[in-house]
Amino acid sequence: MRTVIHQWVEAARDGNNPRVVTKLDGAWLFMGEAQFLPGYMLVVPDPVVTDLNALPLPARDRLLRQVGLVGDALLEHTDAVRINYEILGNLQPALHVHIFPRYADEAEDLRTKPVWSYDWDAAPRFDPDRDKALMDKVKSYLAKVGLI
């Protein structure tokens, strides 16, 4: 089944996805389209697989390590107080890991709830000019720790 995730990866391979932060070993790091939590990113394996259990163990271990290091980079370069990680695949049945920085200044009624409680349609959209500085900092951090 061809999903939006497949389209993102194909566009990244072709150099036509402006949301690419960097190519990882066997995966891509993307900025999320909805930036209601600044720094929302996703890691997607390349080639795309259906779910985490479809990855061979070495690739699975590598992907989860990469996800954790992206979280470290976001903690270093944002005001996030923690990072939430989610792997769902219910709407888009292709493995993609959501990485959500969470902030102390989030609205009280949303701070302790899953991010799906936010109004995604009203969220600020990815902006390559606004988001470039953070993308560059995350990429630099990942290079410093030897991930790229």
Image (spheres, rainbow, N blue to C red):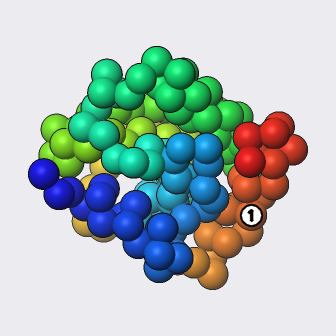
Q: Residue furthest right?
A: 144
Q: Nearer the viewer, residue 73 or 43?
A: 43
Which structural element holds mark 1?
helix
What is the quadrant of residue 50 in the picture? Answer: top left
Would you place residue 103 above or below residue 53 in this image? below
Residue 23 shows up from this direction? yes
Looking at the rendered structure, the kind of residue marked 1 is Asp
Q: Residue furthest top?
A: 57
Which residue lies at the image location 19% right of the left edge and 42% below the top edge? 93
Which residue lies at the image location 55% right of the left edge and 65% below the top edge? 20
Measuring from the top left, give residue 62's x and y in whole percent.
58, 28
Is the residue marked by circle 1 packed among few (<14), some (14-19), or many (20+) residues within 10 Å? Answer: few
Q: Nearer the viewer, residue 139 or 129?
A: 139
Which residue in the structure is indicated by mark 1? 136
Would you place residue 110 above or below residue 8 in this image? above
Measuring from the top left, give residue 49's x and y in whole percent.
30, 40
